[in-house]
Image: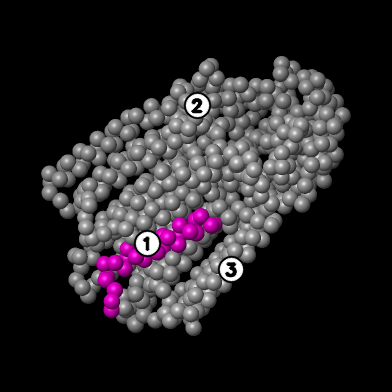
Amino acid sequence: MIIFIILGFVSSIFQLTLLREFTFSIAKNELSLIVAIGIWIASCSLASFLRTKKVFISNLGLAVLLSLGFGACVCLAHLAKSLFAFNYYESVSVLFALGAGFLIMAPMGFLTGYAFSQFNEDEIRKEDENTKHVSHPFAYEALGVLAGGILFTLALSFFTNPLSFCALGLLFIPAIKATSKQKLVATLLIMAVSVVFSQNYQTILKKEFQDARIVSYQGSALGPLIATEKNNTRALYVNGTLAATSEDKETDETFIHTAFSTVKKISAVLWVGPCFTSQLEEMEKYPGISITCVDLNPRPQNLPSFYASGKNVHYVTEDPRRFLKKNKNSYDLIVMNIPAPSALGFNRFFTLEFFNKIKDRLSPDGTFVFAIPSKRDILSPSIKNFSSCILNTLEQVFPSRFIIPSDSMMIVSSRQPVSAQGLMENFEKNQIKAPFFTSFHLKDALDAEKKDYILKNINHDIPINTDLKPYGFVYYLLLEQVKFFPPLSLALKPFKKQILAGVLCVLVVMGFWIARRKELSMPLCAGIFGFCSIGASAIVYFIFQLISGALFWKLGIVVGLFMGGLGAGVFIPDVVLKKEEMKLKYLGWLFLLWLALCLEMFTWANGRLSGFLGEIVWAGFSFECGLVTGAGYTLIVRLWQKKTDVNLTSIAPMIYAADLAGAFLGTLLFSTLFIPFLGIDLCFLILAGTLVVAGLKSLA
């Protein structure tokens, strides 16, 4: 069974690496990551289902092909956008992201599923007819995934060159039965593949960045940090986002001096998000001010042109949400330098809950300032909806809001009213020398007519953005997709009702179909377990990112714990039931256990637990999801084995295929429809409804 542990270990690292490369280079958000997982799962399922008993490639050949396929998919992840003339930081259409996801994730998912099926058939043939444990390969593969996930999070997530992982194919060689000559040839081929790919990574990066010079490239737990230079312009990309350029001087002067003019007297400033050299230079023009900069990403030491240290600046490397909760200091000015909520990791800084944390840290006369994408003169429907969502959310927290229209609209929130006259007086009093920003620029930005135009277009019926209902993220994604699909128009409330009506119809039809059948279909049960496990896992990913902001760093542990739980769960029925005759009611009890787990998760999700303890709790839920899923595998296998007309060698691949097919459906529905449009609470309701409908037949 060692071959399954190795397969799980290698496929785990390959999958986690590809997910990061796909997300940072192409998709840019976590829900696309879940879709990518679904594509991997569907490909695994397809391979297990299509593979015949005829061997088309040897086990050694599979090891070489896995390394070769991984290298090719990583290259494709970095070159896909440049082939269509997209810049690295630009958003792409949902169809482009989906197509790229299939090209990048499907080949490796297919190879993994094919390898599992082939290794499983070899293992079944070795065992005595009375000792065949057709569910055990799942457990051993899961243990390998757990080991790979833990190692990835603790050590390998800091990788700089992902193509160096091509060499992991060598781990298969000792575990595969073959002649010494065959093993030597396979070893040399994998080494050659690894060297060729890894040595050309810089060339691939240069092509990805439109032939720009790569000044610096370094990996981190949270994602890549890349500095480039082209046409005498330097650019910095952090975790797939364009964070700063050498041409930002005018923007920085406008943003900082406007923000500092919103308060009459400033002694303490909190800067939320990355703070760059050009921004720090402007803030240091205000003497006697203490500045605290808090950001989740560590500050690199080798890029002084982008990251410099200040005299009166205290840098804190920590999640800002966690910092605000435990820090009890008050600030006269809080400035948020976070990109628009294009991802869930950014959206968590634009929610009702985060704004309340900000309000708690403001002094009585303090202000909170940030900017969102907008337009100064003409607002499109998509911009109106997005702006309305953010402003309506702020209105729930702050008594006073003041907006400054532009292509990057500044929003000032406070307890006390803020006026245009007050801003002008404060700016002139400070006597700041800024070549690109003067009192004339500020006066023009404060034009009352343009501000009134924006406020009149605010739709107060647009729902607010909360932690468990990420509507800010949804409206921003719709805003981005309008660039590619101009006729796109979606009213959230009616669409939400349509989704719920569709789910209800499906559950009713499924319930009648199950009730009319003489016996419960085992492949259907496997598919339902896959659907529920990936649905619950998607919720775990969402909450984990909400709590920590470090999903891409700790995803290996979260996924690994799920697979570890799955591995342990496979053995539980054998230990508890031993040699008892398998009965359908045991499966019904497991459905009830699933339902109890969903209720437990629902309670914790609404309990707003945060911090390191919250991470532990939700990582634990990932383990529990795996536990009940693994137990389901064994129960379904033993129930299926009772049928006399079943070929034992086909049971595991069929269950594997059915489970993964259900999981693929779950990833698509939960990532594209349920989580963004319905919110977390209704997602739990859908899971509960599915479990009740499926479990009634087995308990009857």
Q: Which amino acid does label 3 sit on?
A: Cys
* Residue 505: numbered disc: 3
Magenta-colored segment: predominant secondary structure: helix
**Coloring scheme used:** one colour
Q: What residue type is labelled 1?
A: Ala
On the rendered image, what quadrant is the N terminus found in?
A: bottom left
Is disc 1 placed on a helix, strand or loop? Answer: helix
Query: Residue shown at 17%/41% (left/top)?
Result: 185
The answer to whether residue 661 is magenta is yes
Q: Residues within 10 Å of mark 1 (few under 14, many from 20)?
A: many
Do labels 2 and 3 touch, CB within 8 Å? no
Which of discs 2 and 1 lies nearer the camera? The answer is 1
Is disc 3 placed on a helix, strand or loop? Answer: helix
Q: Could one spot residue 395 in this view of the protein?
A: yes
Part of the protein shown in magenta: 644-670
Q: How far apart are marks 1 and 3 (CA)?
A: 26 Å
Q: State whether residue 567 is above or below residue 274.
A: below
* Residue 227: numbered disc: 2
**Tag 3 or tag 2, which sits nearer the N-term?**
2
Tell me residue 575's x, y (percent): 35, 74
Q: Residues within 10 Å of mark 2 (few under 14, many from 20)?
A: many
Q: What residue type is labelled 2?
A: Ala
Q: Distance between the residues labelled 2 and 1?
A: 43 Å
Q: How far apart are marks 2 and 3 (CA)?
A: 52 Å
Query: Where is mark 1, residue-wise?
Result: 657
Q: State whether residue 197 is above or below residue 306.
A: below
